[in-house]
Structure formats: structure tokens, C-alpha cells
Image (cartoon, rainbow, N blue to C red):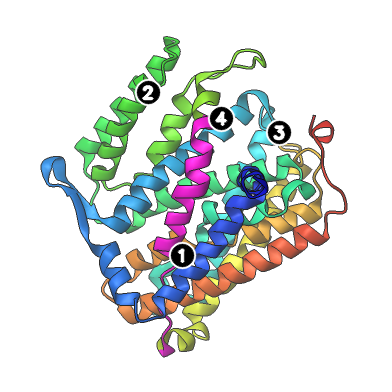
Amino acid sequence: MNLTKYFKKFFSSNQASGIILIFCVAVSLLIANSSAAESFQAFLDKETGTDIFHLQYPVSIWINDGLMAVFFLLVGLEIKREMIEGELSSFKNASLPIFAAMGGMLVPAIIYASLNYGTTYSNGWGIPMATDIAFSLAIISLLGNKIPNSIKIFLAALAIVDDLGAILVIAIFYTDQIHWIYLLLSLGVTALLFLLNFLKVTKIIFYLIPGLFLWYFLHHSGIHATIAGVLLAFSIPTNVSDVEISPLEKLEHSLHFPVSFLIMPIFALANTNITFTNEMISGVTSTLGIGIILGLVAGKLLGINLFSLLAIKFKLSSLPHNSSWKQMIGVGLLAGIGFTMSIFIALLSFKNEIEIQNEAKFAILIASFIAAISGYLVLNLGSHRKFTEADEN
């Protein structure tokens, strides 16, 4: 009986999903560097699905484009709720993550490009622009109530804007071909979803079914399909009432457990299977490795905080509620966890150049590890109190 109570408490805590995610990262790295590496990679590369409607993809694609769209749906729901009735409901608060994300994309790209201009690595300038939203939120969740909710919301909003920016960069600079018919169909479905909201349709099923079509059309358009989750989230109706539970809040509540304890761990297992080689280590000291590490760690920190400072100085934005610049520095470091999106851009940047891809992967892993540890330590050491519900109001 005590064990059951313990596990109920464990799975309801903010830290639980972060602990499980980090455990899955360790397991995945162990598998990738063991005798089971080839079998595990073969499983991820195995095509599954149906040829009908061209829905047959490797397992890894179903995870990264399919399951992660659900993750983006949940985060999008949380961001929308905060925009309607919470921390992001004022323009000054809502604008800060946008300015911060802009700095967090531009400065890392400039650092990388300046180090690799005219070299064979020059095409990888987009690699340090990305923030891995799943891993960064997992690390900050380990701090529990030592961090105000406003900082967690700021990081989530920043990471979403950052990922949308990365998706846009991929679509413009790294996509061989945009299928315009599918893109137009995606816009049509998006318009339908917001029309349903305007007509005050409240049954969630009437949003989820078009949402599936939106994912399908976006995926076939050549644009990263996870953006479908964000678009769907922003179309779900909500309200500012504490009495009536809105469709958004119902869906948000139902998604929390499967996303935290199923989708994110699967995502970590599938995307951390990096097999270490000698070539990877030598690549860290090249301009490729230095550009990635400096871009993700120093570039993100500098860009996010510089642009945030400018936005606040010009009175366009304000610091998140109950937060400090020490915590903003910690967030800037956590945003340097590029990981899966950075690896994805690295694969697109250096197609058919396996050795450079492996060097980039290792540099991304090192940078993400440095960003995660340093960000956690700065936030943990810089927070000397625990925030209660009364503090958040």
C-alpha cells in the first residue's frame, strides 16, 4: 500500500518526468555504445504504417514527427492558456519570449558563421540556433518550486518561438522542395479550425479530426509536421472562468500524463542513440565543433539576455513575475540544449557526409550537456526560496 502511494506521489510530481527523461537518455546512450546498437538502429529505421495515402515511414519519423506533434500540442495549449488568463496575458510579458528567441537564434548563428565562413562547414550555421524544448523543460522541472512558474512559462514560450524559427529556417534554407498544394491545404485546414473556434464549437473531437489532416498535409508539404500541434492548440477554445472548465483545459489535463510519461521518454530513447567514435572526438577541436559549442552555450546565453535587456530597457517588455536576472541567465543557458533539432539541422546541412555529421552530433551532445548542467546549477544556486501558490498570484 505504501509503495502504491509512493508511486502516485512520484508520478504526480513536477520532477518525475524530468528524472525519467534523463534516465532514458542514459539508457539510449548505453544501447548505442553496446552490442545492441545495430539492432536498435535497425528497429528505428524499420518502415511501418501503410502505403495507402503514403503513410509508411521509419519508426524514428513516427516518433519525431508524429508523437512530438502531440507534445507540441500540449505545450501550445499551456502557452495559449497563459496568454488568455495567465503570465503571458499582458503584452509586455508575452513579447519578452519573442525578443529573447530572436536573440537566441541570431547570435549563435553569427558566432558559428564567423568561425566557419568560407570553410566546408559553412552550411551548418543553423545548427546552434535551435533549442530542444523537451529536454530544456525536463531540466527546469527538476527544480520544482524553487523556480517561479513564470520562468518555466517564459522558457516554454521562448522554446516554442525558437522551434518555430528553426522550422522556418529549415523550410527556407534546408528543404529541397516545398509542395505548395499540401501547404495550401494546410492553410485551409488551419482556417477551418479557427472558424470552428469563432463559431464557438466546443466539442474537442471536431478539432482533433481536422488536426490529423493538418498534420498529414504539413508533413507532405516538406515543413516539419510538429508545427501542426501548435496551430491546433491555438485553435482550441478556452475562457477566463475559474468555474467552467474549457475544452482547452480538458484536453490539456488529459494529455499531461501520456506526454510526460510515454511520449517524452520514447522521444529520448529514440534520439539519444549516438555511437561514439574516434572521429567524433577530433571534430570537437575543429571550427565546426567550436562553432557549435560556442554558439549553443555562449551564443544562446548572450543572445537571449541581450535582447531581453534591450526589450526591457526600451519598455517593450518586462521581466517575468517573481523572477530575477540570475534566473534569466539560467534560462539562457538551458536554452543552449540544442540536441534533437540541432542534430536534425546538422543532418540536413551535411547530407551524405557521415563523418561531418558524426562530428556535429558529438559537439551538439557536449554543448547540450554543458548547457544543461550549468543552467541547472545557476538556477538552483540562484534561488534561495520556494514559491507557493500565494507567491504566484
In percent of width and height, residue 241 lies at 65, 14
The residue tagged 4 is 80
The residue tagged 2 is 207
The residue tagged 3 is 92
Viewer-closest of 88 and 385: 385
| Up-down relation of residue 358 to residue 197 (above or below) | below
Looking at marks 4 and 2 on the same chain, the residue that comes earlier in the sequence is marked by 4
Q: Amino acid at mark 4?
A: Lys
Viewer-closest of 236 and 387: 387
Viewer-closest of 232 and 310: 232
The verdict on residue 271 being magenta is yes
Crowd around label 2: few <14 · some 14–19 · many ≥20 (10 Å):
many
The image quarter containing residue 352 is bottom left
Q: Is residue 203 left or right of residue 179?
A: right
Looking at marks 1 and 4 on the same chain, the residue that comes earlier in the sequence is marked by 4
Q: Amino acid at mark 2?
A: Tyr
